[in-house]
Image (tube, rainbow, N blue to C red):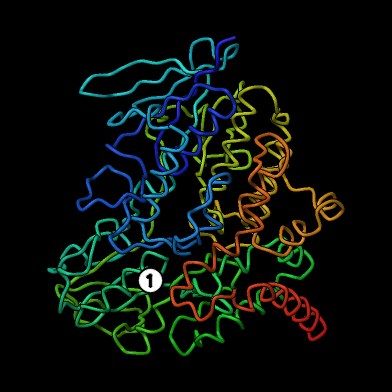
Amino acid sequence: MPAKRIAVIGAGVSGIAAIKICLEEGLEPTCFEGSHDIGGLWRYEENCEPGKAYSVYKSATCNTSKEMTAFSDYPFPDYYPNYLHNSKLMKYLRMYVKHFDLLKYIHFLSKVCSVKKSSDFSSTGQWDVVVEADGKQEFYVFDAVMVCSGYYTDPCFPLENFPGITRFKGLYFHSWEYRSPEKFLGKKILVVGIGNSGADVASELSHVAKQVFLSTRRGAWVWNRVWDNGNPMDTVLFTRFNSVMNRILTTSMINKWAENKLNSRFNHEVYGLQPEHRFLSHQATLSDDLPHHIISGRLRVKPNVKEFTETAAIFEDGTQEQVDVVIFATGYTFNFPFLEGNSEVLDSQCTMFKFVFPPQLEKPTLAFIGILQPMGATIPVSELQSRWATRIFKGLNKLPPVSDMMATIKKMRDKIGKQFLKSPRDTRRVPFVDYMDEIASEIKVKPNLLSLFLWDPKLAFEVFFGPCTPYQYRLQGPGKWNGARKAILTQRERIIKPLRTRVLSNNKPSFYLSFWFIGICVSILFFLAFIIKV
């Protein structure tokens, strides 16, 4: 029986993962990429073209560390820094593509114009795909489609919410267009929005601008990449142990712990960043530099903009600041123009079962990969979604009945509605470890901790108490990788190696064998003390 033909839309990190997983499952992928290269948003481009997906600015660095971000069977080189500049991540993606020989499956400069059900879809599940390349349209038929076009496709530019902006005589634009700070030397700049991009752009511009103002409507909790003892934040927080504790502790207890922790770095109220919402109610902002620029006066936090004049911004507290440039870091939306008019495929709310499968299709042959916002790295999430999707395509796994899927979706929406603020940033937000385990359970690759503790206690200890790295999902089941155990047991060496550029002795530092054990003991004692106190 010939291999099923799969269309992969987009060659960013999710598309690359999808191609590789298709090959792993014996499928025949064809990837269509509208640009001239791989990498998606992580490929820096000097000039941004309207209609093209978001591209990082020149200095952009990953918010997730390398061990948490890696593909599950391809660790980063041990000498790579823990948090990667975009150029380093691109180099890693090229290494991955070369290692698994994926390039030949990608059609560059190929824009997907439409994806529609074939006339016999109810029996075959096939899709008619129209692609434009070299100025002409080509028609294909595929057995399944994986949409990997990304979460950051269209800038959200709500100018209607800012009266007077059209009469402002200075420069204003969306942060999507921002590339580097040089041309803003000596300017007074207002950045609107305090998400990750807003905080990064405002911080970087503070080095060259005469003054930077950062306007925020609701404030933000700000955390940082470098956590306790200098460890990468996500390797400390995103563990199975912490996931268990999150289920034991109440939301109020977790909020209190997190807010006290973040305020111990700097007092959010004093710095003008204190939000009205609790920590877990809205996505926090990650920034190492923001408090340093605030305390040095190079960056001043302001409330929401009430209106603009020709030369100034007037804020809701009545204050006014003269500005030369306004940068709107107001986020992004995603859409699927190739599915327009296909309401029977995807409704206006982009309803998806576990953020992957539209529930109403007669045949489950359409999957959305990476179209969500995990509280962690995207690559391992997209990879696991792809592993699940391809097994559904092959009939090795089944989706529940439509009624059950809709009930699950409603339950998830109700939970999000109660837990989070009503914000586009939170509608597709998922906890990293819990969501990874949920998808892994579908294909039986979630680590069996009981078995590991019985037969390999050393590995079990690292799997439970250590960072929940993607290699854990290659220990067993379909797609098992023989190198997974070694990758897990050596992950701390790869974390430490790039930091030890000044070696103080020929021996490993004494904390290497003990810092994780001490950290675990301290964490347990802290949580117990916290529970007793509360």
Q: Classify the position of the N terminus by image quarter.
A: top right
In-front residue for pair 182/464 = 464
Q: How many marks?
A: 1
**At which x and y percent is residue 527?**
76, 78
Q: Is residue 48 left or right of residue 102?
A: left
In-front residue for pair 302/131 = 131
| For residue 487, above or below residue 196 | above
**At which x and y percent is residue 140?**
40, 16
Q: Who's the residue at 28% across and 19% down the image?
A: 137
In-front residue for pair 358/16 = 16
Q: Who's the residue at 71% across and 27% down the image?
A: 398
Q: Is residue 509 left or right of residue 213?
A: right
Q: Quadrant of residue 158?
A: bottom left
Q: Classify the position of the C terminus by image quarter.
A: bottom right
Q: Quadrant of residue 94?
A: top left
Q: Who's the residue at 74% across and 60% down the image?
A: 464
Would you name the residue on which mark 1 appears?
199
Q: Quadrant of residue 331?
A: bottom left
Mark 1 crowdedness (10 Å alpha carbons): few <14, some 14-19, many ≥20: many
Instruction: Confirm whether residue 416 shows in the render.
Output: no
**At which x and y percent is residue 248?**
79, 67
